[in-house]
């Protein structure tokens, strides 16, 4: 499967998670770019080449939910997948109802993530 033209943006302030997800995506044939914050992603120019975004919920400044809401207000149609390692009152249904293409708890099921990316990045 050649999916190199499909850049996936991975946004997480945990560098171990970033490295792990970028390696997973690369081994599945995707080009992945890592960002340590939503702000870094938004100011990098990466949005224009991104086909899908994977973002953590809990980050220091703009949260994954904040990024999702910001991009939806900008009429951005790029699929956004939310990941979280911290339990919260917000459920998967909450994120999906707010426009996320998917939701995963950490540790992320790599096979399920790659399958979802394949279905939303057509």
Image: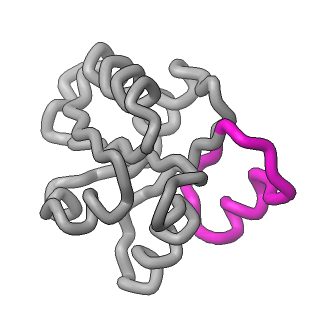
For the N terminus, the quadrant is top left
Q: Which residues are magenta?
A: 85-103
Question: Image point 72% across, 42% down: which residue?
Answer: 86
- Queried whether the magenta region covers residue 92, the answer comes back as yes
- Queried whether the magenta region covers residue 104, the answer comes back as no
Question: Image point 40% across, 74% down: which residue?
Answer: 71
Kindly indicate the quadrant of the structure image that contains residue 94: bottom right
Residue 37 sits above or below residue 34 on the image:
below
Kindly indicate the quadrant of the structure image that contains residue 8: top left
Q: Quick one: which residue is furthest to the front in this view?
A: 60
Residue 104 image offset from top left, x and y in percent:
64, 38
Q: Quick one: which residue is furthest to the right in this view?
A: 89
Residue 43 sits above or below residue 87 on the image:
below
Residue 58 image offset from top left, x and y in percent:
59, 52
- Report whether 38 appears left or right of 92: left
Question: Image point 52% across, 21% down: which residue?
Answer: 110
Residue 89 sits above or below residue 12 on the image:
below
Kindly indicate the quadrant of the structure image that contains residue 70: bottom left
Question: Image point 39% across, 47% down: which residue?
Answer: 11
Between 65 and 25, the residue placed more toward the observer is 65
* Tally of numbered tags: 0
């Amino acid at each position: 499967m050649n999916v190199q033209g499909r850049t996936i943006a991975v946004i997480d302030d945990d560098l171990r998670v970033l490295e792990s997800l970028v390696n997973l995506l690369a081994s599945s044939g995707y080009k992945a770019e890592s960002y340590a914050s939503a702000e870094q992603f938004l100011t990098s120019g990466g949005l224009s080449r991104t086909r899908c975004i994977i973002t953590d919920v809990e980050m220091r400044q703009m949260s994954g939910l904040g990024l999702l809401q910001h991009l939806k207000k900008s009429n951005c149609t790029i699929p956004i997948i939310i990941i979280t390692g911290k339990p919260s009152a917000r459920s998967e249904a909450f994120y999906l109802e707010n426009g996320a293409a998917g939701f995963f708890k950490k540790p992320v099921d790599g096979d399920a993530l790659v399958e979802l990316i394949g279905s939303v990045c057509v």
